[in-house]
Image (cartoon, rainbow, N blue to C red):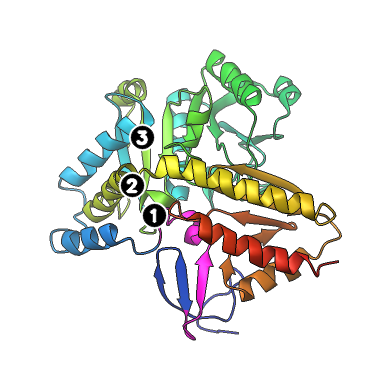
């Protein structure tokens, strides 16, 4: 055990020495393919050369400046995000983590509606702390079962400040996608009763599901959009973007919110470059096509080993392989790690969120390794 680092999450004994593109290299110079983009952040791949170059240039200009100045990087990023989201004359604020951004968005919704409760789908993970925390002590968090429309009848929407929609729950139930009718019903009731709609795009944003943002797969016009993780491709930056209507309401209901790394020019410059690279490299289209290929290969594997693989769930490059209950998923997971593949295993389900730059030959190599292990799995 390493007594210099708090053991707050499990990890291997391997030391990471460098990362590049899809690859990690340990102290023995062994190569691993990262099928989770770090913590779902490096959508462009690790140490993308255009991001690295931008960082070198920006650190010589300004990294952080505090509260007394505006900066062009933040204002340009806000305009770019609004274009991606599909709103006009809105506004943004930039923070460090998705958890901060989610909690600020909920704070705004509660202030504007003068209500306290927040509705979320039970397969969604909103934040590590605060209003979004998954905790029995959070009396203001209302969970609705995934795709259970009848459960809406039991919810008093008059008490709900905001509905927080995460359209690809990757954390709790290991990749779940709500169906369109379910989302339509939630949104309809929310709008009828004056609830704000928050699109929580920390995991599903920046092209992960084949569109800029996950809510764009549905008939949703959110009032507030939260981004994080891949917005900085590994650098910690998150965003809260609101519509012009929310801006107008906030004008007469302002409050002070200030934290250390707010609208920092370095983070904003990086995020602006991330948006630019996604466009230049046509990664939205690549994500859709490559994701479909990955899903098809996993489905073929399921047909060959139906007594091992229970279900495949996929949209874009967010995928899950759920194994049968009696299968030793941890054993297979560890063998695949030893074979050089990094991903997550939970509840006998494997989760894959690789960088959007992944190619077919990377997927083919993983499928071969997976198949080889399945062939001797009982």
Residue at the outermost left position = 61
- What is the crowding at mark 1: few (fewer than 14 residues within 10 Å), some, or many (at least 20)? many
**Residue 84's image quarter?**
top left
Position of residue 154 relative to residue 375, above or below, is above
- 43 falls in the magenta region: yes
Q: Which residue is mark 3?
A: 241
What element does badge 1 sit on?
Answer: loop
Residue in view at x 50 percent, y 36 percent: 214
Q: Is label 3 or label 1 in front?
A: 1
- 150 falls in the magenta region: no
Q: Which residues are magenta?
A: 26-45
- What is the crowding at mark 3: few (fewer than 14 residues within 10 Å), some, or many (at least 20)? many
Q: Which residue is mark 1?
A: 44
Position of residue 290 relative to residue 8, above or below, is above
Percent of width and height locating residue 11: 59, 73
Q: Foreground: 77 or 312?
A: 312
Residue 136 in sight here:
yes
Percent of width and height locating residue 7: 58, 74
Residue in view at x 58 percent, y 31 percent: 117
Percent of width and height locating residue 90: 30, 27
Q: Is label 2 or label 1 in front?
A: 2
Residue 134 in sight here:
no
The image quadrant where one finds the C terminus is bottom right
Q: Foreground: 357 or 170?
A: 357
Which circle marks residue 263 in the picture?
none
Q: Is residue 87 left or right of residue 374?
A: left
Which circle marks residue 281 in the picture?
2
| Callouts 2 and 1 close, C-beta under 8 Å | yes
């Amino acid at each position: 055990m390493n007594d210099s680092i708090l053991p707050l999450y499990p990890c291997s004994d391997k030391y990471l020495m460098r990362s590049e593109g899809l690859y990690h290299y340990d102290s023995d110079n062994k190569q691993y393919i990262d099928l989770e983009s770090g913590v779902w952040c490096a959508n462009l791949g690790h140490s993308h050369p255009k991001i690295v170059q931008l960082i070198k240039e920006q650190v010589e200009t300004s990294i952080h400046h505090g509260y007394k100045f505006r900066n062009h990087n933040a204002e340009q990023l806000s305009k770019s995000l609004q274009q991606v989201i599909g709103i006009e004359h809105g506004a943004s604020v930039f923070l460090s983590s998705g958890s901060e951004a989610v909690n600020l968005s909920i704070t705004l919704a509660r202030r504007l509606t003068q209500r306290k409760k927040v509705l979320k789908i039970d397969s969604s993970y909103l934040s590590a702390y605060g209003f979004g925390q998954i905790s029995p002590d959070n009396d203001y968090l209302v969970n609705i079962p995934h795709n259970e429309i009848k459960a809406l009848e039991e919810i008093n929407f008059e008490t709900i400040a905001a509905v927080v929609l995460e359209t690809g729950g990757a954390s709790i139930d290991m990749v779940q996608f709500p169906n369109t009718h379910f989302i339509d019903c939630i949104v309809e009731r929310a709008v009828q009763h004056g609830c704000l709609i928050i699109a929580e795009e920390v995991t599903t944003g920046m092209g992960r599901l084949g569109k800029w943002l996950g809510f764009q797969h549905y008939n949703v016009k959110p009032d507030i959009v939260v981004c994080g993780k891949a917005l900085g491709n590994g650098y910690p930056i998150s965003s809260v973007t609101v519509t012009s209507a929310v801006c107008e309401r906030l004008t007469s209901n302002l409050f002070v919110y200030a934290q250390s790394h707010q609208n920092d020019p370095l983070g904003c410059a990086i995020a602006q470059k991330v948006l630019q690279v996604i466009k230049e490299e046509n990664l939205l289209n690549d994500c859709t096509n490559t994701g479909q290929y990955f899903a098809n290969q996993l489905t073929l594997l399921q047909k060959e080993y139906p007594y091992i693989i229970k279900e495949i769930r996929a949209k874009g490059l967010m995928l899950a392989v759920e194994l049968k209950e009696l299968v030793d998923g941890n054993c297979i997971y560890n063998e695949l790690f030893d074979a050089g593949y990094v991903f997550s295993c939970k509840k006998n389900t494997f989760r894959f969120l690789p960088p959007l730059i992944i190619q077919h030959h990377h997927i083919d190599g993983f499928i071969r390794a997976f198949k080889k292990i399945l062939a001797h799995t009982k």
